[in-house]
Amino acid sequence: MKKQDFIVQKELIQRLVRYKNILLKFKSMGLSKAFSDNLGDAAGVSSSLVRKDFSLAHLAVGNKRGGYPIDVLLQRLDALLGTQILQRIVIVGCGKIGTALMNYKGFANENVEVVAGFDNNPARINPAAAPIPILPVSQLAAFVKEQDIQVAVLAVPENAAAGILDQLAAAGVQGVLNFSPVQLKAGSSLFIQNINIAFEIENLFYYVRFNQRRAAAET
Amino acid sequence: MKKQDFIVQKELIQRLVRYKNILLKFKSMGLSKAFSDNLGDAAGVSSSLVRKDFSLAHLAVGNKRGGYPIDVLLQRLDALLGTQILQRIVIVGCGKIGTALMNYKGFANENVEVVAGFDNNPARINPAAAPIPILPVSQLAAFVKEQDIQVAVLAVPENAAAGILDQLAAAGVQGVLNFSPVQLKAGSSLFIQNINIAFEIENLFYYVRFNQRRAAAET
DNA sequence: TAGATTGTTAATCGATTAACAATC
DNA sequence: TAGATTGTTAATCGATTAACAATC
């Protein structure tokens, strides 16, 4: 397998996922063909970039006149992104955010299944809970190994995050979505996506002020 | 006010917020000076970039020998990012995610206050709830105008998102953090930050598979 | 002073866009 | 066929890094 067979650029992958969702929408509207032009429009990128992305991802199946057949494109995107496989995850930390995620309906659409929650608080533990059991953190490593879980969501307090991360890494988890307010660093064997909500809000306020100042300066 | 007085690059602002948090940590460890070298280390960027960022943001206060005085730097970052001002937000949609956010403790640290929640479900509405009242969506526009709310969090189902966004824009909201699984587009008067959790998970799985394939190819 | 570190300029790198030949 | 659209190459743009003079 040559190295070019893989996509490294993070933004590219995110755009591919976005294309996929747009194509699904197009399809549900009864369309069977897509063009780099209207796909780009819907995704908020240029048509050049759409064609370039398809070219880089080796999924160019376009017809020089008739655009891209949506079905073929979707099939290839699914194969590339692996979205047809059921994706099993665990959630560590069953506080407000963790519990909300356990009940998040958006997962089903994306073929994601939450198979268990983990917590340290005895009041929250309930191995018989349906459909998602809540187990003690002490069982985390064994569960992950036995069930071959590759991706985990972290929603624990700041001071617990690093410790849990170590346990997950040792147990073989390879991807972590981190909601705890610490910027966790990825090791070589582990990919981490940090989502810091307060941080996003802070950014937002800066932009708002930025725009206000610009508007004030323009008048 | 000249145009250069503003920072446009999104990544730069995010790094500035990160620097701020690191400096706070340094300070709590008893340090009074920071260097582009150790700041960059902690932030995961090069020392060049740290110096460049400070230069672009006009907050260079470094001493050619003794590094940056942490207190002065923090003061200027706070002034620039406006983090010393109490930031009032509303949350629209009080389902699982919305409720979790209303109780999110990370906000307090960042000077963010949730002043009200809004929902359409009568069972959830409770104007007397403490400390955060939950009001009907019909009162959203009036509340936002009266209280001069500039930033809102959107945690409503996919099909309601666009409608609420219009109401928020019309009422004068300028920044929206969107958790609903639709990629909302920003108008000229409104900045939107989209967080799509299922989407992030999907990306994560792609990376995991990418790494596995690479590891397999290398052996 | 000598050594270390900043602030800035120039070089590099990478991603996006524009252009256009190929062709359906 | 003529017109439209792809796939790819070359040009552009912007962000990061390297280098180094200034100087504490």
Image (cartoon, coloured by chain):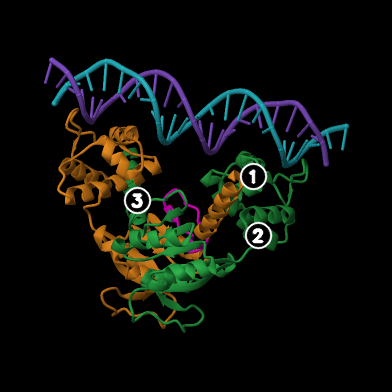
Chain colours: A green, B orange, C purple, D cyan
Residue assigned mark 3 = A203
Disc 2 is attached to a residue of which chain? A
The first of marks 3 and 2 along the sequence is 2
- For image coordinates 38% across by 65% down, the residue present is A155
Residue B70 is at least partly visible in this image: yes
Dot 2 alpha-carbon crowd within 10 angstroms: few under 14, some 14 to 19, many 20 or more: some
- For image coordinates 64% across by 52% down, the residue present is A80
The first of marks 1 and 2 along the sequence is 2
Give B194 or B140, whichever is nearer the viewer: B194
State yes or no: residue A149 in magenta. Answer: no
Residue assigned mark 1 = A57
Q: Are marks 1 and 3 in contact (CB under 8 Å)?
A: no
The relative height of residue B211 versus residue B131 in the rendered view (above or below) is above
Disc 3 is attached to a residue of which chain? A
* Res B9 quadrant in image: top left
Q: Nearer the viewer, mark 1 or mark 3?
A: 1
The relative height of residue B161 versus residue A55 in the rendered view (above or below) is below
Give, as a single range, the part of the protein colored magenta. B178-198
Give B16 or A23, whichever is nearer the viewer: B16
What number of labels is visible? 3
Q: Position of residue B172 (x, y in %)?
A: 37, 57
Q: Amino acid at mark 1?
A: Ala
Alpha carbon separation for disc pair 1 and 3? 32 Å
Residue assigned mark 2 = A24
Q: Amino acid at mark 2?
A: Leu
For the residues tagged 3 and 2, is the chain the same?
yes
Q: Secondary structure at mark 1?
A: loop
Q: Secondary structure at mark 3?
A: helix
Q: Are marks 1 and 2 in contact (CB under 8 Å)?
A: no
Q: Position of residue A113 (x, y in %)?
A: 55, 70
